[in-house]
Protein backbone atom coordinates (compact mmCIF):
# COMPACT_ATOMS: atom_id res chain seq x y z
CA UNK A 1 0.00 0.00 0.00
CA UNK A 2 1.49 3.34 -1.04
CA UNK A 3 0.90 6.46 1.04
CA UNK A 4 1.71 10.19 1.11
CA UNK A 5 5.00 10.77 2.97
CA UNK A 6 5.97 13.23 5.72
CA UNK A 7 9.34 14.78 6.62
CA UNK A 8 10.82 16.10 9.85
CA UNK A 9 12.87 18.95 8.37
CA UNK A 10 12.81 22.13 10.50
CA UNK A 11 11.85 25.56 9.16
CA UNK A 12 15.47 26.63 9.36
CA UNK A 13 16.72 23.65 7.37
CA UNK A 14 14.03 24.19 4.75
CA UNK A 15 14.81 27.89 4.43
CA UNK A 16 18.51 27.16 3.98
CA UNK A 17 17.62 24.65 1.26
CA UNK A 18 15.27 27.11 -0.49
CA UNK A 19 17.93 29.83 -0.41
CA UNK A 20 20.45 27.41 -1.90
CA UNK A 21 18.07 26.53 -4.74
CA UNK A 22 18.21 30.12 -5.96
CA UNK A 23 21.80 29.48 -7.03
CA UNK A 24 20.46 27.05 -9.64
CA UNK A 25 17.55 29.23 -10.82
CA UNK A 26 14.98 26.84 -9.43
CA UNK A 27 12.38 27.20 -6.68
CA UNK A 28 10.01 24.86 -4.84
CA UNK A 29 6.56 24.69 -6.39
CA UNK A 30 4.98 23.46 -3.17
CA UNK A 31 5.37 26.78 -1.33
CA UNK A 32 3.46 28.70 -4.02
CA UNK A 33 1.14 25.93 -5.21
CA UNK A 34 -1.98 27.75 -3.98
CA UNK A 35 -1.11 30.94 -5.86
CA UNK A 36 -0.70 28.99 -9.08
CA UNK A 37 -3.57 26.54 -8.97
CA UNK A 38 -6.36 28.74 -7.67
CA UNK A 39 -9.84 27.29 -7.41
CA UNK A 40 -11.09 29.99 -9.75
CA UNK A 41 -9.69 33.15 -11.34
CA UNK A 42 -9.46 36.38 -9.34
CA UNK A 43 -8.55 39.27 -11.60
CA UNK A 44 -6.15 41.91 -10.34
CA UNK A 45 -8.11 44.35 -12.48
CA UNK A 46 -10.92 46.10 -10.59
CA UNK A 47 -14.30 47.29 -11.84
CA UNK A 48 -13.89 50.94 -12.81
CA UNK A 49 -15.76 53.75 -14.55
CA UNK A 50 -14.28 56.65 -16.54
CA UNK A 51 -16.59 59.66 -16.85
CA UNK A 52 -16.96 61.44 -20.17
CA UNK A 53 -17.69 64.69 -18.32
CA UNK A 54 -14.24 64.44 -16.72
CA UNK A 55 -12.27 63.00 -19.65
CA UNK A 56 -13.48 65.21 -22.49
CA UNK A 57 -11.93 68.41 -21.02
CA UNK A 58 -8.65 66.51 -20.49
CA UNK A 59 -8.66 65.36 -24.12
CA UNK A 60 -9.22 68.96 -25.25
CA UNK A 61 -6.37 70.09 -23.00
CA UNK A 62 -4.11 67.42 -24.49
CA UNK A 63 -4.98 68.78 -27.93
CA UNK A 64 -3.89 72.29 -26.83
CA UNK A 65 -0.61 71.10 -25.37
CA UNK A 66 0.54 68.31 -27.71
CA UNK A 67 0.53 68.19 -31.51
CA UNK A 68 0.28 65.07 -33.66
CA UNK A 69 3.84 65.77 -34.83
CA UNK A 70 4.96 65.10 -31.23
CA UNK A 71 2.54 62.36 -30.28
CA UNK A 72 2.32 59.38 -32.65
CA UNK A 73 -1.23 59.07 -31.32
CA UNK A 74 -2.87 61.56 -28.96
CA UNK A 75 -4.49 59.03 -26.68
CA UNK A 76 -5.49 59.26 -23.02
CA UNK A 77 -5.01 55.71 -21.75
CA UNK A 78 -7.61 54.30 -19.39
CA UNK A 79 -5.45 52.44 -16.90
CA UNK A 80 -7.06 50.02 -14.50
CA UNK A 81 -6.35 51.15 -10.90
CA UNK A 82 -5.84 47.53 -9.84
CA UNK A 83 -3.12 46.78 -12.39
CA UNK A 84 -0.54 49.18 -10.91
CA UNK A 85 0.90 50.97 -13.88
CA UNK A 86 0.44 48.25 -16.50
CA UNK A 87 -0.73 49.59 -19.87
CA UNK A 88 -4.04 47.81 -19.57
CA UNK A 89 -7.71 48.49 -18.88
CA UNK A 90 -8.47 44.86 -18.13
CA UNK A 91 -5.90 42.09 -17.89
CA UNK A 92 -5.90 41.56 -21.67
CA UNK A 93 -7.59 44.63 -23.18
CA UNK A 94 -6.68 48.28 -23.56
CA UNK A 95 -8.92 51.27 -24.05
CA UNK A 96 -8.15 54.93 -24.59
CA UNK A 97 -9.69 58.17 -25.72
CA UNK A 98 -8.16 59.62 -28.89
CA UNK A 99 -8.59 63.16 -30.15
CA UNK A 100 -7.83 64.51 -33.63
CA UNK A 101 -8.39 68.24 -34.12
CA UNK A 102 -9.62 70.03 -37.26
CA UNK A 103 -6.94 70.04 -39.96
CA UNK A 104 -4.82 67.37 -38.26
CA UNK A 105 -3.63 63.98 -39.36
CA UNK A 106 -2.22 61.20 -37.19
CA UNK A 107 0.46 59.70 -39.41
CA UNK A 108 0.25 56.29 -41.08
CA UNK A 109 1.69 53.27 -39.31
CA UNK A 110 0.96 49.62 -38.69
CA UNK A 111 1.36 47.25 -35.75
CA UNK A 112 0.49 43.71 -34.78
CA UNK A 113 -1.93 44.67 -32.00
CA UNK A 114 -5.39 44.99 -33.54
CA UNK A 115 -7.41 48.13 -32.90
CA UNK A 116 -11.03 49.18 -33.03
CA UNK A 117 -12.45 52.69 -32.91
CA UNK A 118 -15.90 53.53 -31.64
CA UNK A 119 -16.74 57.08 -32.70
CA UNK A 120 -17.96 59.38 -29.95
CA UNK A 121 -17.81 62.94 -31.31
CA UNK A 122 -17.28 64.06 -34.90
CA UNK A 123 -18.87 65.74 -37.86
CA UNK A 124 -16.91 63.52 -40.24
CA UNK A 125 -13.25 62.76 -40.77
CA UNK A 126 -11.78 59.39 -41.61
CA UNK A 127 -9.32 56.60 -40.98
CA UNK A 128 -7.62 55.08 -44.01
CA UNK A 129 -7.13 51.32 -43.57
CA UNK A 130 -4.82 49.70 -46.13
CA UNK A 131 -5.84 52.19 -48.84
CA UNK A 132 -9.54 52.20 -47.94
CA UNK A 133 -10.78 55.60 -46.70
CA UNK A 134 -13.34 54.89 -43.98
CA UNK A 135 -15.67 57.71 -42.88
CA UNK A 136 -16.10 58.17 -39.11
CA UNK A 137 -19.39 59.43 -37.75
CA UNK A 138 -20.68 59.11 -34.17
CA UNK A 139 -21.63 55.54 -33.30
CA UNK A 140 -19.58 54.06 -36.15
CA UNK A 141 -17.29 51.12 -35.43
CA UNK A 142 -14.05 51.05 -37.46
CA UNK A 143 -11.57 48.16 -37.47
CA UNK A 144 -7.83 48.37 -38.02
CA UNK A 145 -6.70 44.73 -37.93
CA UNK A 146 -3.26 43.32 -37.14
CA UNK A 147 -0.60 44.76 -39.51
CA UNK A 148 -2.98 46.96 -41.55
CA UNK A 149 -1.65 50.44 -42.40
CA UNK A 150 -3.80 53.13 -40.83
CA UNK A 151 -3.80 56.91 -40.52
CA UNK A 152 -6.46 59.26 -39.23
CA UNK A 153 -7.52 62.61 -40.67
CA UNK A 154 -9.87 65.35 -39.61
CA UNK A 155 -11.00 67.42 -42.62
CA UNK A 156 -13.90 68.98 -40.70
CA UNK A 157 -14.16 72.04 -38.45
CA UNK A 158 -14.90 70.14 -35.26
CA UNK A 159 -12.81 67.82 -33.03
CA UNK A 160 -12.97 64.07 -33.56
CA UNK A 161 -12.96 62.04 -30.34
CA UNK A 162 -13.26 58.28 -30.24
CA UNK A 163 -12.80 55.27 -28.04
CA UNK A 164 -9.80 53.11 -29.00
CA UNK A 165 -9.86 49.42 -28.14
CA UNK A 166 -6.74 47.27 -28.55
CA UNK A 167 -5.57 43.78 -27.61
CA UNK A 168 -2.17 45.27 -26.72
CA UNK A 169 -1.82 43.82 -23.18
CA UNK A 170 -2.33 40.34 -24.63
CA UNK A 171 0.02 40.86 -27.57
CA UNK A 172 2.68 42.30 -25.26
CA UNK A 173 2.34 39.32 -22.94
CA UNK A 174 2.86 37.05 -25.95
CA UNK A 175 5.90 39.15 -26.93
CA UNK A 176 4.56 39.59 -30.44
CA UNK A 177 4.45 43.37 -30.81
CA UNK A 178 5.81 44.69 -34.11
CA UNK A 179 5.45 48.30 -35.22
CA UNK A 180 6.36 50.11 -38.43
CA UNK A 181 5.84 53.72 -39.50
CA UNK A 182 4.74 54.26 -43.10
CA UNK A 183 7.45 56.03 -45.18
CA UNK A 184 5.13 59.03 -45.62
CA UNK A 185 2.75 60.78 -43.23
CA UNK A 186 -0.34 59.80 -45.18
CA UNK A 187 -0.81 56.58 -47.14
CA UNK A 188 -2.33 56.68 -50.63
CA UNK A 189 -6.00 55.89 -51.07
CA UNK A 190 -6.21 52.98 -53.48
CA UNK A 191 -9.89 52.06 -53.33
CA UNK A 192 -13.27 53.70 -53.74
CA UNK A 193 -14.26 55.52 -50.52
CA UNK A 194 -15.50 53.08 -47.86
CA UNK A 195 -14.71 50.17 -50.18
CA UNK A 196 -14.98 47.43 -47.53
CA UNK A 197 -18.48 48.64 -46.75
CA UNK A 198 -19.45 48.64 -50.42
CA UNK A 199 -18.11 45.09 -50.68
CA UNK A 200 -19.25 43.53 -47.40
CA UNK A 201 -21.59 46.01 -45.73
CA UNK A 202 -24.80 44.38 -46.90
CA UNK A 203 -24.03 41.55 -44.50
CA UNK A 204 -26.21 38.86 -45.99
CA UNK A 205 -25.04 39.59 -49.55
CA UNK A 206 -21.32 39.06 -50.07
CA UNK A 207 -19.17 38.93 -53.20
CA UNK A 208 -19.58 35.53 -54.84
CA UNK A 209 -16.60 35.80 -57.17
CA UNK A 210 -14.01 35.45 -54.45
CA UNK A 211 -13.53 34.05 -50.97
CA UNK A 212 -11.94 35.73 -47.97
CA UNK A 213 -9.70 33.66 -45.75
CA UNK A 214 -8.46 36.40 -43.43
CA UNK A 215 -8.74 35.73 -39.71
CA UNK A 216 -10.39 39.11 -39.13
CA UNK A 217 -13.50 40.66 -40.58
CA UNK A 218 -12.93 42.09 -44.08
CA UNK A 219 -15.51 44.77 -43.21
CA UNK A 220 -13.72 47.77 -41.69
CA UNK A 221 -16.77 49.96 -41.14
CA UNK A 222 -19.99 49.22 -39.24
CA UNK A 223 -21.95 52.49 -39.55
CA UNK A 224 -24.19 53.57 -36.70
CA UNK A 225 -27.35 53.96 -38.81
CA UNK A 226 -27.30 50.24 -39.65
CA UNK A 227 -26.54 49.29 -36.03
CA UNK A 228 -29.37 51.43 -34.70
CA UNK A 229 -31.79 50.12 -37.33
CA UNK A 230 -30.98 46.54 -36.33
CA UNK A 231 -31.45 47.22 -32.61
CA UNK A 232 -34.65 49.19 -33.14
CA UNK A 233 -36.15 46.61 -35.43
CA UNK A 234 -35.42 43.66 -33.17
CA UNK A 235 -36.06 45.09 -29.68
CA UNK A 236 -39.86 45.10 -29.80
CA UNK A 237 -39.93 41.58 -31.24
CA UNK A 238 -37.79 39.61 -28.79
CA UNK A 239 -36.88 39.21 -25.14
CA UNK A 240 -33.20 39.00 -26.00
CA UNK A 241 -30.57 37.61 -23.65
CA UNK A 242 -31.42 37.37 -19.93
CA UNK A 243 -27.93 38.71 -19.18
CA UNK A 244 -27.56 41.39 -21.84
CA UNK A 245 -30.92 42.37 -23.25
CA UNK A 246 -31.05 42.74 -27.02
CA UNK A 247 -27.38 42.14 -27.73
CA UNK A 248 -25.91 41.91 -31.25
CA UNK A 249 -22.42 40.94 -32.32
CA UNK A 250 -20.52 42.81 -35.03
CA UNK A 251 -19.57 39.80 -37.11
CA UNK A 252 -17.22 38.89 -39.89
CA UNK A 253 -19.80 38.78 -42.71
CA UNK A 254 -17.96 36.00 -44.54
CA UNK A 255 -18.09 33.42 -41.74
CA UNK A 256 -20.18 34.76 -38.86
CA UNK A 257 -17.08 34.88 -36.65
CA UNK A 258 -15.85 37.69 -34.40
CA UNK A 259 -14.44 40.97 -35.74
CA UNK A 260 -10.90 39.93 -34.79
CA UNK A 261 -9.37 36.62 -33.66
CA UNK A 262 -8.45 38.44 -30.42
CA UNK A 263 -11.48 40.69 -29.83
CA UNK A 264 -15.21 40.50 -30.32
CA UNK A 265 -17.50 43.55 -30.45
CA UNK A 266 -21.10 43.87 -29.32
CA UNK A 267 -23.86 46.43 -29.03
CA UNK A 268 -26.81 45.98 -26.71
CA UNK A 269 -30.08 47.74 -26.10
CA UNK A 270 -31.63 47.78 -22.64
CA UNK A 271 -35.28 48.71 -22.83
CA UNK A 272 -36.73 51.38 -20.50
CA UNK A 273 -36.65 49.96 -16.96
CA UNK A 274 -34.98 46.72 -18.07
CA UNK A 275 -32.67 44.99 -15.61
CA UNK A 276 -30.72 41.90 -16.60
CA UNK A 277 -29.71 38.84 -14.64
CA UNK A 278 -26.18 38.49 -13.30
CA UNK A 279 -23.57 36.20 -14.82
CA UNK A 280 -19.82 35.98 -15.08
CA UNK A 281 -17.40 34.69 -17.69
CA UNK A 282 -13.67 34.26 -17.95
CA UNK A 283 -13.55 36.88 -20.69
CA UNK A 284 -13.21 40.53 -19.69
CA UNK A 285 -15.18 43.38 -21.24
CA UNK A 286 -14.90 47.12 -21.77
CA UNK A 287 -18.19 49.00 -22.17
CA UNK A 288 -19.06 52.41 -23.55
CA UNK A 289 -22.51 53.85 -23.08
CA UNK A 290 -23.65 55.20 -26.42
CA UNK A 291 -26.87 56.66 -25.07
CA UNK A 292 -29.04 56.44 -22.00
CA UNK A 293 -28.18 56.26 -18.31
CA UNK A 294 -28.14 53.36 -15.95
CA UNK A 295 -25.87 51.29 -13.80
CA UNK A 296 -24.00 48.05 -13.91
CA UNK A 297 -23.33 46.12 -10.72
CA UNK A 298 -19.91 44.48 -10.99
CA UNK A 299 -18.73 42.23 -8.18
CA UNK A 300 -21.23 43.94 -5.87
CA UNK A 301 -20.03 47.41 -6.86
CA UNK A 302 -22.42 49.87 -8.52
CA UNK A 303 -21.01 51.68 -11.56
CA UNK A 304 -23.45 54.42 -12.60
CA UNK A 305 -23.02 55.41 -16.23
CA UNK A 306 -24.11 58.42 -18.19
CA UNK A 307 -23.91 58.82 -21.97
CA UNK A 308 -20.35 58.36 -23.34
CA UNK A 309 -18.87 56.98 -20.10
CA UNK A 310 -16.55 53.95 -20.24
CA UNK A 311 -16.35 51.14 -17.70
CA UNK A 312 -14.72 47.76 -17.41
CA UNK A 313 -15.81 44.36 -16.17
CA UNK A 314 -12.80 42.18 -15.25
CA UNK A 315 -12.91 38.48 -16.04
CA UNK A 316 -14.90 36.14 -13.81
CA UNK A 317 -16.77 38.92 -11.98
CA UNK A 318 -20.55 38.81 -11.74
CA UNK A 319 -22.23 41.69 -13.51
CA UNK A 320 -25.76 42.83 -14.31
CA UNK A 321 -27.07 45.88 -16.15
CA UNK A 322 -29.92 48.21 -15.21
CA UNK A 323 -31.46 50.86 -17.46
CA UNK A 324 -32.54 53.47 -14.91
CA UNK A 325 -34.87 55.32 -17.27
CA UNK A 326 -38.58 54.46 -17.43
CA UNK A 327 -38.96 56.04 -20.85
CA UNK A 328 -35.66 55.93 -22.80
CA UNK A 329 -33.68 52.95 -24.06
CA UNK A 330 -30.00 52.61 -23.11
CA UNK A 331 -27.41 51.40 -25.60
CA UNK A 332 -24.01 49.95 -24.66
CA UNK A 333 -21.14 49.22 -27.05
CA UNK A 334 -18.58 46.70 -25.74
CA UNK A 335 -15.56 44.69 -26.72
CA UNK A 336 -14.23 41.49 -25.22
CA UNK A 337 -11.35 39.01 -25.37
CA UNK A 338 -13.84 36.11 -25.54
CA UNK A 339 -12.61 34.95 -28.99
CA UNK A 340 -9.17 34.23 -27.49
CA UNK A 341 -10.58 32.24 -24.59
CA UNK A 342 -13.02 30.46 -26.87
CA UNK A 343 -10.32 29.36 -29.28
CA UNK A 344 -8.21 28.00 -26.41
CA UNK A 345 -11.10 26.18 -24.69
CA UNK A 346 -10.82 28.55 -21.72
CA UNK A 347 -14.12 30.36 -22.06
CA UNK A 348 -16.40 29.56 -19.12
CA UNK A 349 -19.63 31.23 -18.24
CA UNK A 350 -21.78 30.94 -15.14
CA UNK A 351 -25.14 32.41 -14.23
CA UNK A 352 -25.45 33.84 -10.72
CA UNK A 353 -27.16 31.15 -8.62
CA UNK A 354 -29.65 33.69 -7.20
CA UNK A 355 -30.22 35.52 -10.45
CA UNK A 356 -28.92 38.77 -8.98
CA UNK A 357 -26.11 39.94 -6.70
CA UNK A 358 -27.13 40.95 -3.19
C1 LIG B 1 -2.41 53.16 -31.79
O1 LIG B 1 -1.53 52.91 -32.77
C2 LIG B 1 -3.59 53.84 -32.05
O2 LIG B 1 -3.31 53.83 -34.39
C3 LIG B 1 -4.48 54.09 -31.03
O3 LIG B 1 -4.80 55.15 -33.60
C4 LIG B 1 -4.23 53.68 -29.74
C5 LIG B 1 -2.79 52.57 -28.15
C6 LIG B 1 -1.66 51.89 -27.86
C7 LIG B 1 -0.74 51.63 -28.85
C8 LIG B 1 -0.96 52.02 -30.15
C9 LIG B 1 -3.92 54.30 -33.46
C10 LIG B 1 -3.05 53.00 -29.45
C11 LIG B 1 -2.13 52.71 -30.48
Image (cartoon, rainbow, N blue to C red):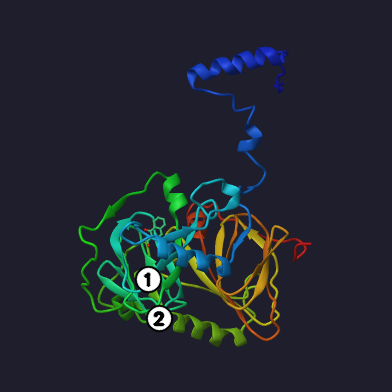
Residue 152, percent across and down?
A: 33, 68
Task: Evaluate if marks 1 and 2 touch, with contact meaning CB atoms under 8 Å apart.
Answer: no
Q: Is residue 18 visible?
A: yes
Q: Residue 329: which numbered mark, if any?
A: none
Question: Which residue has dot 1 on it?
Answer: 101
Looking at the rendered image, the disc whose residue lies closer to the viewer, 1 or 2, is 1
**Number of on-image labels:** 2
Element class at badge 1: loop
Res 208 quadrant in image: bottom left
Above or below, 245 relative to 42? below
Q: In which quarter of the image is ligand 1?
A: bottom left
Q: In which quarter of the image is the N terminus?
A: top right
Above or below, 172 relative to 217? above
User: Which residue is more in the foreground, 51 or 193?
Assistant: 51
Which residue is located at x 33 percent, y 63 percent?
Answer: 214
Which residue is located at x 58 percent, y 17 percent?
Answer: 19
User: Does the beta carbon at disc 2 come under 8 Å from ligand 1?
Assistant: no
Element class at badge 2: loop
User: Which residue is more in the foreground, 313 or 51?
Assistant: 51
Residue 183, percent across and down?
A: 20, 57
Res 310 quadrant in image: bottom right
Residue 198, percent across and down?
A: 31, 81
In the picture, measured across the screen, residue 75 lies left or right of residue 33, that is left
**Alpha carbon distance from label 1 to label 2:** 11 Å
Q: How crowded is mark 1: few (under 14 residues within 10 Å), some or many (20 or more)?
A: many
Question: Which residue has dot 2 on it?
Answer: 123
In the picture, measured across the screen, residue 152 lies left or right of residue 96, that is left
Q: In which quarter of the image is the C terminus?
A: bottom right
Q: How crowded is mark 2: few (under 14 residues within 10 Å), some or many (20 or more)?
A: some
In the picture, measured across the screen, residue 176 lies left or right of residue 328, that is left
Residue 262, percent across and down?
A: 44, 58
Amino acid sequence: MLSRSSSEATEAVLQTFYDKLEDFSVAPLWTVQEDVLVNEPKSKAVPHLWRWSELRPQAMRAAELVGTADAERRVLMMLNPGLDGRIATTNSLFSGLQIVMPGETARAHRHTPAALRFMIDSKGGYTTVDGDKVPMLPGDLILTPNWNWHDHGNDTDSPMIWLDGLDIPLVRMLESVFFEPYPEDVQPITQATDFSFLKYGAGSLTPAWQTSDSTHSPLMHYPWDKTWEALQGLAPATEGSPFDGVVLEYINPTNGGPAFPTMGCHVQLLRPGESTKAHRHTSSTIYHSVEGSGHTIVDGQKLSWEPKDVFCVPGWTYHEHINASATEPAVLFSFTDAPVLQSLSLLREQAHPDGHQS
